[in-house]
């Protein structure tokens, strides 16, 4: 007797969102079933991988990462080009950590210059990411938004305390807002309502639910992402029918298991392999929960995840 696979019929679907311009644009979302449940519904776009490019030399990054990028260390434009040409980045995620008031405290002019340099170096879509410092991000991301006008970039994080100022720039410059909330489905929904009321188009929003690394909050992130996807697909909650953007690389590589050297932790094994596996397992878990975009760092971890993504049918 043939086995009958039980199937669920979903009443909702995820909005399709496009980043980038012209032939270099990428589209995400559009799913009408849970992740990897293509036998139950449509999944027109595979998940996308973005490579993180820091605006200043990230001296806090572990040696395992520095080894991969030492030839472009401190040069964001060259770094972005390497990620595209050597590692096949779908998106370049510029991390403006250099503007952090508690760090180098670079100004908005620095950020705009970096954004322009990266935009000139690569054709793939760009995401500009602040430090989550409300006041500084408002200043920096508005300048970056203007510098990237015409590229339909992702701008984030938009928070409930600065969404009006940054959201206005997103609207006027034709970008995509990345709404960020602290691992809470109700806060995520509320911020989406606020940006929609501001006038951000529904085809120009991504959700950043805040992402934890393996062993450091991943279970909370997984649950919130899963609940967002469930509400969108089974409850037709239009305020949560947006693709999910997961900034995981920075969360994985800052924890001790990924950062400690073999001399510091001789019982934990090869330091680089340890970090790669932690990043890949975190990314795998987020894909299963429903993530549409993964922001990653190590190219070997990316290779592992691409093998998983490529098991999905191409549309």
Image (tube, helix red, strand yellow):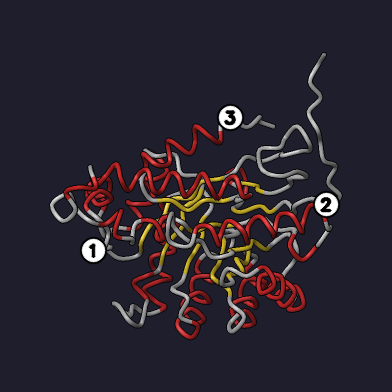
Q: Is residue 257 left or right of residue 6?
A: left
Counting from the top left corner in percent of width and height, residue 185 is at 67, 68
Label 1 – label 3 distance at C-alpha = 36 Å
Q: Give the foreground label among 1 and 2.
A: 2
Contact check, label 2 and label 3, Cβ < 8 Å: no
**Mark 2 packing: few (<14 Cα in 10 Å), some, or many (20+)?**
many
Please state the horizontal and vertical placement of residue 186, each as a whole percent of the image: 69, 72
The residue under the point 73% across, 45% down is 31
231 lies left or right of 283: right
The image quadrant that residue 35 belongs to is: top right
Q: Residue at x 29, y 60 (%)?
A: 256
Measured as percent of width and height from the top left, residue 37 is found at 71, 37
Q: Are marks 1 and 2 in contact (CB under 8 Å)?
A: no
Q: Earlier in the sequence, mark 1 or mark 3?
A: 1
The reply to whether residue 164 is visible in this rendering is: yes
Dot 3: within a 10 Å radius of its alpha carbon, few (fewer than 14), some, or many (20 or more) residues?
Answer: few
In the orientation shown, which residue stands out farthest toward the left? 263
Work out how far the residue at label 2 is from the one at label 3, CA to CA, in angstroms. Answer: 24 Å
- Residue position marked by numbered label 2 in the rendering: 12
Mark 2 or 3 closer to N-term? 2
Residue at image x 65%, y 48%?
A: 28
Return the residue nearer the eye: 274 or 68: 274
Tell me where residue 133 sits by quadrant: bottom left
Q: Is residue 166 above or below residue 23?
A: below
Q: Identify residue for label 3.
A: 311
Task: Say which quadrant the C terminus sits in.
Answer: top right
Q: Secondary structure at mark 3?
A: loop
Mark 1, residue position: 59
């Amino acid at each position: 007797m043939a086995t009958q696979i039980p199937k669920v019929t979903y009443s909702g679907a995820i909005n399709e969102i496009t980043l980038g311009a012209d032939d270099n644009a990428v589209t995400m979302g559009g799913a009408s079933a849970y992740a990897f449940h293509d036998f139950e519904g449509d999944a027109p776009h595979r998940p996308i991988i973005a490579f993180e490019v820091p605006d200043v030399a990230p001296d806090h990054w572990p040696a395992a990462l520095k080894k991969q990028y030492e030839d472009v260390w401190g040069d964001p434009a060259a770094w972005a080009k390497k990620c595209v040409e050597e590692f096949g980045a779908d998106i370049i995620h510029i991390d403006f950590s250099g503007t952090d008031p508690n760090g180098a405290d670079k100004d908005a002019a620095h950020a705009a210059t970096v954004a322009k340099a990266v935009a000139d170096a690569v054709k793939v879509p760009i995401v500009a990411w602040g430090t989550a410092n409300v006041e500084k991000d408002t200043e920096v991301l508005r300048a970056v938004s203007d510098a990237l006008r015409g590229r339909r970039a992702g701008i984030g994080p938009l928070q409930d305390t600065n969404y009006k100022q940054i959201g206005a720039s997103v609207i006027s410059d034709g970008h995509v807002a990345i709404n960020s909330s602290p691992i809470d489905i109700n806060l995520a929904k509320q911020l989406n309502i606020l940006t929609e009321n501001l006038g951000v188009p529904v085809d120009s929003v991504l959700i950043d639910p805040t992402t934890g690394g393996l062993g450091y909050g991943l279970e909370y992130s997984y649950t919130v992402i899963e609940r967002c996807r469930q509400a969108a697909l089974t409850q037709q909650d239009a305020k949560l029918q947006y693709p999910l953007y997961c900034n995981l690389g920075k969360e994985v590589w800052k924890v001790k298991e990924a950062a400690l050297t073999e001399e510091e932790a001789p019982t934990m094994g090869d330091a680089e392999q340890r970090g790669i596996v932690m990043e890949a397992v975190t990314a795998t878990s987020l894909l299963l929960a429903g993530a549409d975009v993964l922001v990653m760092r190590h190219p070997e971890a990316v290779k592992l995840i691409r093998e998983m993504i490529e098991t999905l049918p191409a549309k």
